[in-house]
Structure formats: structure tokens, C-alpha cells
Image: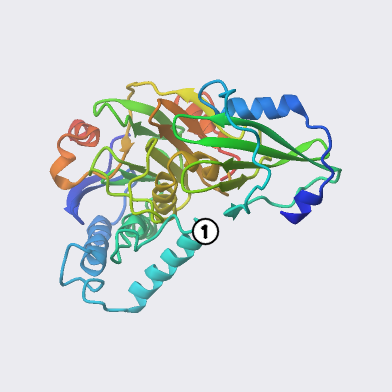
Amino acid sequence: MSLLRRAVPAAVATAAVVALLANVRSRPPDLSAKPVVSDVPEPRRVSARPATVAGRVRTGTGQIITTPFSVIQVRVTFTGKQLTRVETVELSGNGPRTQAINAHAEPILREEALEAGSAKIDVVSGATYTSESYRDSLQSAIDAARG
Amino acid sequence: MPPVASRIEHVMGIPVGIDVRDEIARDAVDRAFAHLRWVDATFSTYRRDSAISRGERSPAVAGVLERCERLGAETGGWFDVRATGRLDPSGFVKGWALDGAAAILAGAGARNLCLHAGGDVLVRGERAPGRAWRVGIQHPLRRDRLAAVLGARDLAVATSGAYERGQHIVDPHTGKPPVGVLSVTVAGPDLGTADAYATAAFAMGVDGPAWTAGLHGYDALTILADGRVLSTPGISQLRAASTGLSNSSRTASM
């Protein structure tokens, strides 16, 4: 963290930040949100690896985003031209929390809408069902069809 | 290719299915189920006579608890075998039991197999030459529907959600069920680990997807309560493999 804080606060690659935010938020930012909280807490978990590329380290902080469940802020770090770290700072809930994740692959998370489909499948992964609820499960239908 | 050996038995309070597509020794499936019954007798928190209920600390129990401790550390405390107030390693044990059963079958020569246990899935090889196993991800709101289909070879898939056994996963920090998330599916090489990661990510609620993006060797698909599906890049490749479009492609992280 201290390294990041000392990092030169260079101009942010705005387009990249916006692209990231698009992956995280569910609706347009709440413009009435309070100003940026300056004292960002320590990450509760840091999984970022050292950058594999050399270059100047730059960090940028995005707008505050209000989702139905939380108020979050995204901070990104570039090493040279490579996006090397993303931190999601949650500003609501049980006090500020920070999530830091790797960003070697783009996009970090793909977003789509939940759809209900059907297909020929061999097996179903779902939340634990017991022997009692098995007969109501998709898996039991598959097993019955298999004979 | 039809199963050469296929059987469902109820063990550990859940139905367990074994489907082997190779000719193997006749008793290998028996031994795989015997292993699952041993795991149940040792680790079931529902059985007062199980080793874990009696407080016994055999090398097997100690080994499992050690794995759980490590998974607790890896997940920043979000996978917690004491989250409900008593020792309950079931979140890891079910998947770990299937990993063991698969190893027994592999030892008997099974290269193409599919195991399932109460919603956990483990596949090895293919369902037929050149054809990946098709693993459906249960739609969390519609029991008869799928939210996604993965094409899988040598993959473990575990899903945690609030839609089957009620709210049985709690945030270990608050003791309350997470909000904002319907289910988390984790796919990777080891089912016990996938199970623990899915439990942890589900407990994190809306923070889960960001955490799963930092996992090494495991991919995740999270369905949020607002209808958004957030998945790590490897999931897209697994989904494409289910249609046969990229028959030989594998996720880069595996």
C-alpha cells in the first residue's frame, strides 16, 4: 500500500477506468454520491502478483458507484501500459473494505444477463440437494433417462 | 458412448452418481462407494458416532482439518469450518470424498468418468471420443432450467447457492446469510478446493466475483440477485467448449 501511495499520481488512463467500471456497475453512477473518501483502508486481501513488465507505475481512482447492495470505488494500477492491479474499495456495509485483484487478463469479469436455458447435458452442478430433494432435481431426470 | 458402469447410491445424505465409460475391474465402483461410506462414517456431523462428532483426531481427520485451515487462510477467513458455531468441514469434505473416489476409479483404469454428489460434479476424460462432458449449471430460480452449460474435460465443478437447502451458508464475520448473490459456481482441477472456494465466494456476497477473479487455476460464475451473471474469462472458454466450437481448447488457467 505504501508503495502505491507514494506512486506518482499521474494522469489516469480514463478510458480504461471507464471500461472497468462498466464491468462492475449495474446502473449508471449515482451522481449524488458523496465526494471521494481520501483515507483508503488497507486491503483485506491482496492477491496481486508482481507485474511481469517493467514500466512506470500509475494509479487512478474511479468515481464512486452506488449499486443496489453497496457503494464502491474502483482503483486501477498500470505498470507501463499493462493493467496490473484492480482494487475495489467498498465504502458501505460493515465499514470500508478493499478488494484487490489481478488484472493480467482483460476483461477481468465478463458480465451478461441471467437467462434460463435448456440443453442436452450429462450432469448438473447446483447448490447441494439432499436425497429427499433429489427426485425433484434436474440430475434425477438425467439419471432416469440414462437408465 | 453409453456408460459401461453407472450407479446411483445415497451416501452422506445425498445421492451420488458414478458413470464410467471405460471397461474397468468390476469391483472398482464398489470400492469407490465404500470410500464414500467411510468418509461419511468419519466426517458426518449428522452422525453422533462419527469420528469427527466424537472429537477423534485420527491422521485422516487431522489431515482434512489442516486442508480446511489452509483453505481458510487462502480465502481470507471466508471459508470457515466454524462459521455456524460448531466444527463442520462438510463444505470441503463432500468434494474431497469425490476426489478420492475418482482416484480409486482412475487407479482401476477409468480414464473417462463422471461423478456427481448432491450438485457437485467431477469429470475426467470425455463422455465419448472427441466429445467433452456437458455440465449444466443449475438456474437458481427455475428448478427445471439451466443458467449455463460448460464443456468439460478433467474438471471439477462446485456450486454454492441459497436456493436448495435454505440459507445454510453464512458470512463467518457476521453469522448472517450473504445478500445480493444467488449462486456461485467454481470450476477447477480439485473438487474439494472448488467446493471451499464456492462456499467462500458465496459468503462474500456481492464482493465474491472480484475475489474469484484473483484465483489461480480456478474459474467462477456468479449469479447476482439483480440478474447479472459475472464470470471469469475461463468460463467463456468452457461454455464455448460445450457447443463443440472449440473442441480442443482448454482454459488458459488450467
Task: Report the colour scheme.
Answer: rainbow
Q: Residue B119: name its quadrant.
A: top left
Q: Quadrant of the N terminus of chain B?
A: top left
Amino acid at the residue labelled 1: Glu
User: Residue A60, image x and y in percent?
Assistant: 74, 36
Q: Nearer the viewer, residue A89 or A140?
A: A89
Please tell me which residue is depicted at 54% across the width and 27% down the height of the picture: A25
Lateral position of residue A49 relative to residue A8, left or right = left
User: Residue B133, percent across and down?
Assistant: 39, 36
**Relative horizontal placement of residue A54, taking residue A88 as reference (left or right):** right
Query: Can residue B125 be seen?
Result: no
Q: Residue at x 13, y 44 (%)?
A: A132
Number of numbered tags placed on the structure image: 1
Instruction: Label 1: state its secondary structure.
Output: helix
Residue annotated with mark 1? B74
The spot of residue B91 in percent (x, y) is 34, 55
User: Is B197 left or right of B166, judged from the image as shown?
Assistant: right
Residue A120 figure quarter: top left
Above or below — where is B180 with respect to B67? above
**Quarter of the rendering containing residue A137:** top left
Residue A76 placement, left or right of A98 = right
Residue found at x 40% / y 56%: B192
In the figure, B212 relative to B94: above or below?
A: above
**Looking at the picture, does residue B147 appear above or below residue A53?**
above
Q: Is residue A4 visible?
A: yes
Q: Closer to the camera, A138 or B104?
A: A138
Crowd around label 1: few <14 · some 14–19 · many ≥20 (10 Å): some
Q: Position of residue B78 (x, y in %)?
A: 44, 55
Q: Chain of mark 1?
A: B
